[in-house]
Amino acid sequence: MASFLLESYTPECEPAVLDQLTARAREAAEEALREGLQVRHVRSFLAPEDSICFHLFEAPSAEVIVHVSEIASFDYQRITEVIE
């Protein structure tokens, strides 16, 4: 599977918010998995100076990550394939 980085504007960049966003990303990936899509949430992290939260996923395509973002209600700016 490929790795994808979902970039989402997050005006409230605080550690407590990161915990909530990470839980939403993980739960959305688990729901998509139950729907039969191959996806795994790897980790989430904040860039507080830019008010951006990044979520790293493994999936076969960016379209799967778009679906996960819809489940999680993330207003994403960009989804990019990345190499680790």
Image (cartoon, rainbow, N blue to C red):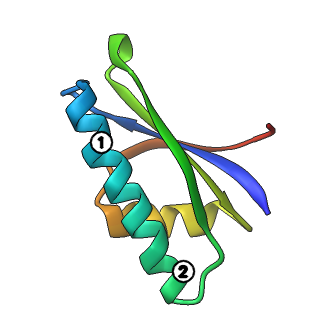
**Kind of residue at disc 2:** Leu
**Residue 10, quarter of picture:** top left
**Kind of residue at disc 1:** Asp
Q: Residue at x 48, y 68 (%)?
A: 29
Which residue position is annotated with label 2? 33
- The first of marks 1 and 2 along the sequence is 1
Q: Quadrant of the C terminus?
A: top right
Q: Are marks 1 and 2 in contact (CB under 8 Å)?
A: no
Q: How many numbered discs, if any?
A: 2
Left or right, 39 with reference to 76: right
Left or right, 19 with reference to 62: left
Q: Position of residue 20 (x, y in %)?
A: 25, 47
Left or right, 39 with reference to 53: right
Which residue position is annotated with label 1? 19
Q: Residue at x 60, y 81 (%)?
A: 37
Element type at marker 1?
Answer: helix
Element type at marker 2?
Answer: helix
Residue at the farthest top position: 49
Q: Residue at x 47, y 74 (%)?
A: 30
Front in this rendered view, residue 7 or 19: 19
How many residues crowd mark 2 within 10 Å: few (<14), some (14–19), many (20+)? some
Q: Residue at x 40, y 46 (%)?
A: 76
Determine which of the numbered discs, if any, sits on residue 74 in the image: none
The answer, for residue 42, to whether it is visible in the render is yes
Left or right, 6 with reference to 2: left
Q: Please, is residue 68 above or below residue 47 in the view?
A: below
Q: Please, is residue 3 above or below residue 61 in the view?
A: above
Q: Quadrant of the N terminus?
A: bottom right
The answer, for residue 55, to whether it is visible in the render is no
**Residue 56, quarter of picture:** top right
